[in-house]
Image (cartoon, helix red, strand yellow):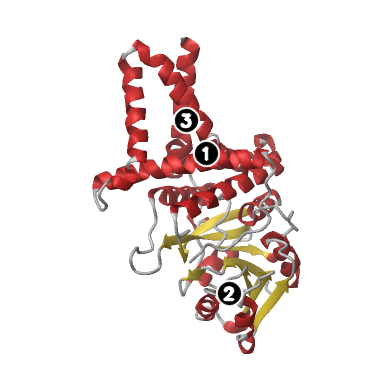
Amino acid sequence: MIGIATTFWVALLAILYAYVGYPAFLWLVSRVGRFDESSCAGESGHLPSVTLIISAYNEEKVIREKIENTLSLDYPRELLEIVIISDGSSDRTCEIVLEFANKSIVLRHYEGRIGKTACLNRALPLAAGGIIVFSDANSSYEKGALKALLGPFQNNTIGFVTGWTKYGSGDGAAPYSLGLYSRLELITKELESCLGSCIGADGAIFAIRKELYLPLKDYDINDLVIPLSINQQGYRGVLQREAICFEKDAGSPKGEFHRQVRITSRTIRAIMNHRQLLNPFRFGLLSFELFSHKVCKFLVPLFLVALLVSNLLLAGSGGFFLTALIAQGIFYVAAGAASFVPKRSLLSRMVEAARIFVVVNVAIALGWVKYLQGEAYTTWSPTKR
């Protein structure tokens, strides 16, 4: 019974650490420790030459809007190269891009559906800018997002800078917003930025020094592997809160779920391929951040099972463990009933948070299955809009 109780407490503490304890620890250290707040952001000064790379596959519905949004950004046009890479698009994507040829929009079309990462490997060496900004066809930037994103590069220790995305329907029915899970992720990255280096980047809006780019494997998830590679070269990454982009959500819970499964599988593969970064004797704080931010979260499904099973075995002793089992039951019932609770109420926000937690962790579990099955996800398809 002592061993089962130990399992219960270890599982509970591991879950709490992954979602609450780690951000709380970062916040506490940031309050009592000394760090340079200027490393978290940068002031606009000398503007570097930039190549903004927009990845696209069959994006005829949104590519015109994306190009127009990019051309409207508050950045000197003579310093901004805009490159559209098309991964074997078979619709009117390339035709629409060529309509902007007089605006010096560069199209790089690659036949054969080789995958986003393979396209980046081919297109990036041809980029003219000293700073490379990565973006997606279905995202739009705030007018000043590019200048905000580039500010921190005045610090020579910074190798990459990430912005962040607000999601919404984009049709006025549901405004662009930030859910509880995304808020926690944003706060965590911001605290990591001030103390060391944030882990990973937002694939729709992040920038790197061109000379730090190393060719990727075709199955690599670029918004994690590129930052990890830059970290391994001795440079830091920071989140820039003023660099904001907007993106429509997946369109359906099912679409968002499958996206999370795909991201999890690719992220696990990236961590496994860069497991040397988990050696604290070589990488110190970065190792701690990577383990706490990514590895711990991806182990939560295992701890959730261990917590429930051990709690079932301990419930017969009554008292605390019986109460804990009842609480778990209420939590999972609430998650399952989230769609039946009236919207715009405190209760609805609570059950929606429970639902998202459960869905995310089921997706993570399936992501592990896909990884173990060898699924590489080298190509992608745009979400129906």
Amino acid type shown at disc 3: Leu
Mark nearer the N terminus (3 vs 2): 2
Mark 1 closeness class: few <14, some 14–19, many ≥20 residues within 10 Å: some
Q: Is residue 110 visible?
A: yes
**CA distance for labels 2 and 1:** 39 Å
Dot 2: element: loop
Displayed quadrant of residue 275: top right
Q: 21 or 139, which is in the foreground?
A: 139
Count the marks. 3
Q: Residue 151 carries which label?
A: none
Q: What residue does disc 2 label?
A: 46
Circle number at residue 297: 1
Q: Is residue 379 left or right of residue 327?
A: right
Query: Could you classify mark 2 by the number of other residues whose Cα lies within 10 Å: few (under 14), some (14-19), or many (20 or more)?
Result: few
Identify the residue position indicated by label 3 in the image.
304
Q: In this view, does 143 lie to the left or right of 226?
A: left
Image point 60% across, 39% down: which residue? 368
Among the two numbered marks 3 and 1 on one chain, the one whose residue lies closer to the N terminus:
1
Numbered disc in front, either 3 or 2: 3
Residue 178: image location, x then y, percent: 39, 56
- Which residue is painted at 45% across and 15% down in the image? 5
The disc labelled 1 sits on which kind of residue?
Lys
Q: Position of residue 292 (x, y in %)?
A: 54, 38
| Residue under the point 61% across and 46% down | 267
- Which is in the foreground here, disc 2 or disc 1? 1
- Asked if disc 3 and disc 2 are in contact, CB closer than 8 Å, the reply is no
Q: How far apart are marks 3 and 2 (CA)?
A: 50 Å
Instruction: Assess whether mark 1 and mark 2 are in contact (beta carbons under 8 angstroms).
Output: no
Identify which residue, 47 or 55, lies in the foreground.
55
Which circle's residue, 2 or 1, is located before the other in the chain?
A: 2
Instruction: Give left or right: position of 36 versus 334.
Output: right
Badge 3 element: helix
